[in-house]
Amino acid sequence: MKVFLFVLMATVLEATGDAVVRVALGSSSPASRILLFAVGATCLTLYGTSLNLAPVEFATVTGLYIATLFVVFQITNFLFFRAVPTPSVLLGGTLIVAGGLIVYIWR
């Protein structure tokens, strides 16, 4: 469970940082653009730092990370941009999650 929570935290930081940077790119106010870039950069820096300070070897959780990343990116995309995944994304995502779990479980 500890490994999954670590992976979940890292993917949430990555997806949120990416989304905030995307919002910053579309912002028309210079002040809000700077603030959003700073928030996005902070999230992405925390993501990279946590990944490199992980208590587990990243190679052993890569499958779990990819599966979790897909799910978290879809949730973040909906929360930030109200984008609903298409059937092809859901089908491909199902394969990504299945493959990620196979890689993680079958070590």
Image (tube, grey):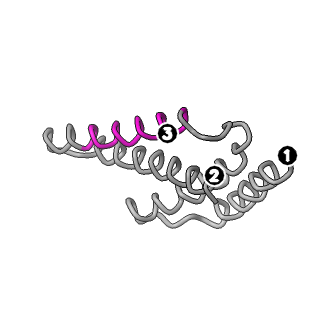
Q: Is residue 45 left or right of residue 68?
A: left
**Circle 2: element type:** helix
Q: Which residues are magenta?
A: 36-52
- Look at the image and tell me in which quarter the N terminus lies: bottom right
Q: Main secondary structure of the magenta part?
A: helix
Viewer-side residue, 12 vs 81: 12
Residue closest to the eye, 32 or 46: 46
Residue type, label 3: Ser
The residue under label 2 is 3
Badge 3 crowding class, 10 Å Cα cut-off, few under 14, some 14 to 19, many 20 or more, is some
Residue 93 drawn above or below residue 58: below
- Pointer 3 residue: 50
Which amino acid does the dot numbered 1 rest on? Answer: Arg
Mark closer to the chain start, 2 or 3: 2
State the image coordinates of residue 74 (x, y, percent, origin top left): 53, 60
Residue type, label 2: Val
Q: Secondary structure at mark 1?
A: loop
- Residue 60: give x, y in percent of width and height: 74, 41
Alpha carbon separation for disc pair 1 and 3: 23 Å
> Considering only order in the chain, which callout, 3 or 1, is on the residue closer to the N terminus?
3
Residue under the point 47% across and 45% down: 14
